[in-house]
Image: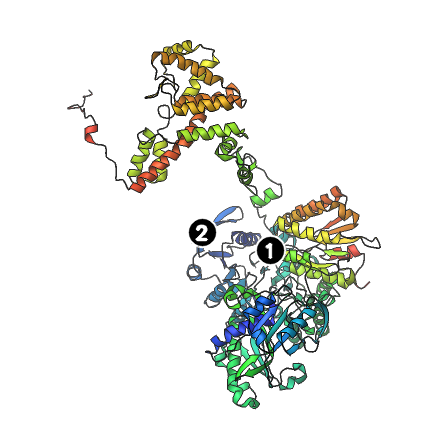
Amino acid sequence: MKNYELFDRNTRAFIYGAQEKAAQRMLDFDYLCKRDIPSVAGFITPTGGGYYKLFWGTKEIRIPRYITLAEAIKANPDADVMVNFASERSCAELTMEAVETENIRTIIMIAEGVPQRDVRKIAKIAREKGKWIIGPATVGGIKPGCFKIGNAAGTIQNIRDTKLYRPGSVGFVSVSGGLSNEGYNIVARNTDGIYEGYAVGGDVYPATTLIDHLLRYEQNPKIKMMVALGEVGGKDEYQIIQAIEEKKLTKPLVMWVTGTCAEMLPNGVQFGHAGANADGKDDTAKAKNTALRKAGVIVPNSFEDYDQKIKETFEKLQADGKIEKLAEPTPPNVPMDYSQAVAEGLVRKPTNFISTICDETGEIHNYCGVPIDQVIKEKYGIGGVLGLLWFKKKLPQYARDFIELVIQIVADHGPAVSGAHNTIVTARAGKGLIESIISGIVTIGPRFGGAVNGAAQHFSWGLEHNLEPREFIDQMKKKNVRVQGIGHRIHSIDNPDERCEIMMNFAKDHFPKHPLLDYALSVQAVTTMKKNTLILNVDGTIGVLFVDLLKSLNYEDEEIKEMIDMGFFNAFFIIGRTMGFMGHYFDQKRLKTPLYRHPWDDILYDVPSKPEEVK
Amino acid sequence: MAQKGIREFDAKRMMAKALPEFSNGKIRFEAAQVLIGANTDLQKLEQENPWLKAGKLVAKPDQLFGKRGLNNLLFVNKTWPEVQKWIAERMNKTVTIKQTTGVTTGKLNQFLVEKFIPHEDEYYLAITTHRENDTIHFSTKGGVNIEEVWDSVVTLEIPILKEIEEMDVAGFLPEELGAKKEIVAEFIIALYKMLVKYHFVYLELNPFTFVNGVPVALDAVAKVDDYASYQCAQYWGELKFPSPFGLEKTPEEERVDELDERTGASLKLTILNPAGRIWNLVAGGGASVIYADTVVDLGYTKELANYGEYSGDPSQELTYAYTKTVLDLMTRQKDPEGRPKYLLIGGGIANFTDVAKTFTGIVQAIKEYQQKLKETNVKIYVRRGGPNYVEGLNIMKDLGTKLGIPIEVYGPETHMTKIVSMALGKKVGE
């Protein structure tokens, strides 16, 4: 590679920062240019190593990530470019680090807002070392057929439209990164295309200026004409005039300095770029354009005829036989990213998942269409939230209150029951919160807590079939099924369970109807005749009252049955009791209780003297 | 913008803090100064600064303009009651001042009051910064328009990679300084170190004098590099960048400034002529200048209503708020002659900004102003390219049809500024 070239078809670069999108754009460009190897050698990402997956055409490839530049260089001694996406706070330091290395020759500083003094120092040191810096505050640039810096030149479609996949005869350089793409477009539409194009950046002191690149273009025999776009402010353009006078620049140059409006505007209006502010009369766009024109630069009357001047200049070179006919390669198709195709409405695919209870993709997450902030403001409470997520309904207040009542009542039932016991044993085995409560929860089922579902099922069956209480009990007996939700260890008809009373009274006061409760109580009247502890217990009360609640909420019997089948009713027990399990877990951890070992005297050892022999 | 002018008050405040540190305590002076705005509590100020009542004072506006003596805005060797009266008479008054750069009209609203320093000698010192070096300018003939005595100015260039210690500072100073040469050199070294560490890009003391053998600035003009604000917060203290004199911001401009500060995106708005008929809503710092240029080049300077730009991939919410501000301004009054107004939604070919996405915010605002836009006879011209531009342009086309507002839409195939001449029906040079 000649001194005046920055990149060729084998140039490989490091990207500082987790810029996968920019890297993908570079790789897509490479693919379009039919480069043999990807131009991205690796990422430098101090937060972690490993790799990023990117596309090379349709195929996915891995691009390594390195923690440090030194590590990256060691693994890829041929890479000589760093595209520095670091923020304005660390951009200077990291660029300096790259300048000081043997290997890195060209560095692009993308960040806007790097302190001037830092850039001035870096620029000077780089110049002394014969290195090239583009930026700061730039999108970079492009060398068609060879190398594209980061996000420069925009979309693949744009690169295709402006033929940036193969070199033309024009060297372009602008101050503004945003306008560089426009510049490539104008050049492409009026000549045979760009050979190289860069934006030096809109800062007061870009590390390399227009003249630095124009002088490179001058030396390059492939470049037949030059196009530049300057800006009001600073005196960098005068170096161009000096170079022309000293015959260091001889190729045709079409140039326009923007900001002619500045003189018409009140003093002190700051344009979009830091460097775009005229301090003296030599800095104005008008003064610069006039001086450039005087020096022999082809300067249009306004940006309006910039394109015309470029066209005329190119056609003149063509007429003089100075432009060689270019080979026109056919660029391969670069597959479109799926996300892009979706955005353009070109593809569709069936989904694998469906959610009808909530959506977290919008501005604010919602529960069944109700934004969470509204849930709080309107005081939905735990009952209201369960209504949204489980029932997909905005429940009336009595329903919310009943759910919360149940959750409070079932929250705990002492350490001896199987779930709490398991939780305690697991906690004492040194396991964490999740394992401990899971070991408790797995005991919930038909024998522990599960009677809620069972009671709902049994009594509903009885009522549905219009069975008299006595008949119901007989039929259950005949089927050899114990009626769930009936019976208590201590409480009896004379010594009722206060918890059941509270729930029943609540239902009687607030539910529009409670047919299953009435039915269950008529069954209780029969069972307690046999034994006065055979009362409707907590599980039974919850079970039948949830059926009544659903009936009050206008659920059909079929729907209620489906809900019972999927364990809906146990869910209230699980959510309530998990609170208790967690309490037991924290209790054991605070007490620092040791591993539990069951005592021998609590185990009946009845082992045969020898196993039965199977012949 | 990177280079920002700061108040004389702030420059002196920073010097008072930095110079003792950078001169090993040799150059030390009390910064007896206060800044007075329209809402300053003068009684409290008086209590906190007893020196105000103790001696003679100097008062002057502190609003980033010079030549205050020439413009009769320097009140020297006066008592505190006299100073209060003098300021009260001028506070919030509009004045026209003459400077070397021209004539500016603006409102006075910040005054610096400091201890009067009786003196005879007045020296000139300035430090300017350039690409490859910083330059120190010194003259024994300070206190005047320095251009008139430029022959007396000596300069010392400090290459960017050199430290001030490596330079022969005393050596460049004129012999006539005599015994003061050494302390002036130390003063310069300390100032230069401050300039570097505090990221000043310009510092001018015209004049400075001596109090008890120590150099003290009587006037100070300074600019800092606001890109360095993250490094300099602790050095700068609380530092606000005032608008240039005569460029007081309208509420709408301030609103856009607030939007701009809220995000990493860039939003700028300067209202040039609220009655103007050409309004720019342009993406990109570079392109926005070119659109304004073209309006001027076509001879419509007087009709140019605003300068503005949005860039750096602003969110839909931001572009919406920005567009609304512009539409509100442009539809406040009809053109007295009933001529149409033009909204130029322009821009180059974006590198990575999603054009369709930024247009959604603009579309939302246009829909909201549908009626007003019709009433004010607004014609809209669109030109843009970049990611998703086809979709973006289609959205705009549909919008025109749907709302019944004339919207003409162009892409990269049309020269960027063509919509200016299309709107105005004129070409450059015609």
Q: Position of residue A607 (x, y in %)?
A: 18, 24
- The residue indicated by pointer 1 is B265
Badge 1 and badge 2 both on one subunit: no
- Image quadrant containing the C terminus of chain A: top left
Q: Mark yes or no: residue B9 visible.
A: yes
Q: Position of residue A293 (x, y in %)?
A: 72, 71
Kind of residue at badge 1: Ala
Q: Nearer the viewer, mark 1 or mark 2?
A: 1
Q: Please determine whether, in this image, residue A74 is positioned above or below residue B177.
A: above
Q: Residue at x 64, y 86 (%)?
A: B151
Instruction: Say left or right for A165 vs A561.
Output: right
On what subunit does the disc labeled 1 rest? B
* Along the line of sight, the residue nearer the viewer: B79 or A402: B79
* Along the line of sight, the residue nearer the viewer: A369 or A582: A582
Instruction: Say left or right for B148 vs B209.
Output: right
Which label was assigned to residue A51?
Answer: 2
Circle 1 packing at 10 Å, graded few (<14), some (14-19), many (20+), is some
Q: Position of residue B365 (x, y in %)?
A: 69, 47
Instruction: Say left or right for A177 vs A529.
Output: right
Instruction: Say left or right for B247 vs A119.
Output: right
Identify the element where label 2 is drawn.
Answer: strand
* Along the line of sight, the residue nearer the viewer: A289 or A492: A492
